[in-house]
Amino acid sequence: MSVSSHILRQPQLALFARQPVAGQTKTRLQPDYPPVRAAEIAAYLIRATAELAVSSWPGDVYLYGAPDAEHPLFRELARDLGIALAAQRGADLGERMLNALRDGLARRNAAAILGCDVPHCSWDLLDQANDWLAQGRNVLGPTEDGGYYFIGLSCDRPELFTDIPWGTPGVLPRTLERAAALGIEFEQLPALTDIDTAADLWLVSQDFPPLRQFMR
């Protein structure tokens, strides 16, 4: 790991999270879990991801909340972990991610987004991602369902966030296809299962014991 490169860039990391409100978050966990329990699982995932981020990422960590950052859990994480809060801005996921990355690029010349559905992402993966970004390399962390849990850029590339079929298995292939057409190269992290459904939760819990508290 290059310490000098970290000092040079200190990339910013943005965590993306929806407020853990019953009936409005983790709806794909239902009907296996009632809305209140699904919201509790969402809150756990957010907290675990935030703790991972602040312990593993050398640069600034922000939590971008939707529909805004005014939720008790978000404020608690800001107080206890020193995370900065911001509201997601944009008409769709692509625009919201692009705006968050632009914020980080303006502050630190390199920026990344980590979703809050992969608390089992290890510290060494984030450290590797940070090191690549600090060297000016772009980074992508794919998910097993055809999306990605991490994206880091060293320059503003809005083309990667327009006309992408968000929420479908086509996100990753379309993103990589667009990147190839534009001559954008990505370093890739190992693929992970992001937790959207009860089946995902069970699968990840086999190797990530903290999730077993939610097994029925």
Image (tube, rainbow, N blue to C red):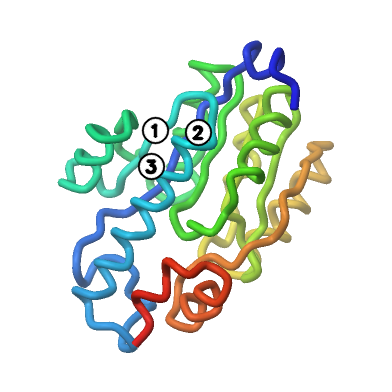
Q: Residue 13 carries which label?
A: 2
Q: What element carries label 2?
A: strand
Q: What element carries label 3?
A: loop
Q: Is mark 1 on a helix, strand or loop?
A: strand
Dot in front, 3 or 2:
2
Which three-letter amino acid code belongs to the residue tagged 1? Tyr
The residue identified by callout 3 is 90
Which three-letter amino acid code belongs to the residue tagged 3? Gly
Which three-letter amino acid code belongs to the residue tagged 2? Leu
Tell me what residue is drawn at x 68 percent, y 59 percent.
Answer: 172
Q: Distance between the residues labelled 3 and 1?
A: 17 Å
Left or right, 69 with respect to 9, comes to left
Label 3 Cα crowd, 10 Å radius (few <14 / some 14-19 / many 20+): few
Tell me what residue is drawn at x 18 percent, y 41 percent.
Answer: 70
Of the 4 image quadrants, the one containing the C terminus is bottom left
Q: How far apart are marks 3 and 2 (CA)?
A: 18 Å
Label 1 Cα crowd, 10 Å radius (few <14 / some 14-19 / many 20+): many
Mark earlier in primary sequence (3, 2) = 2
Mark 3 touching mark 2, by CB under 8 A?
A: no
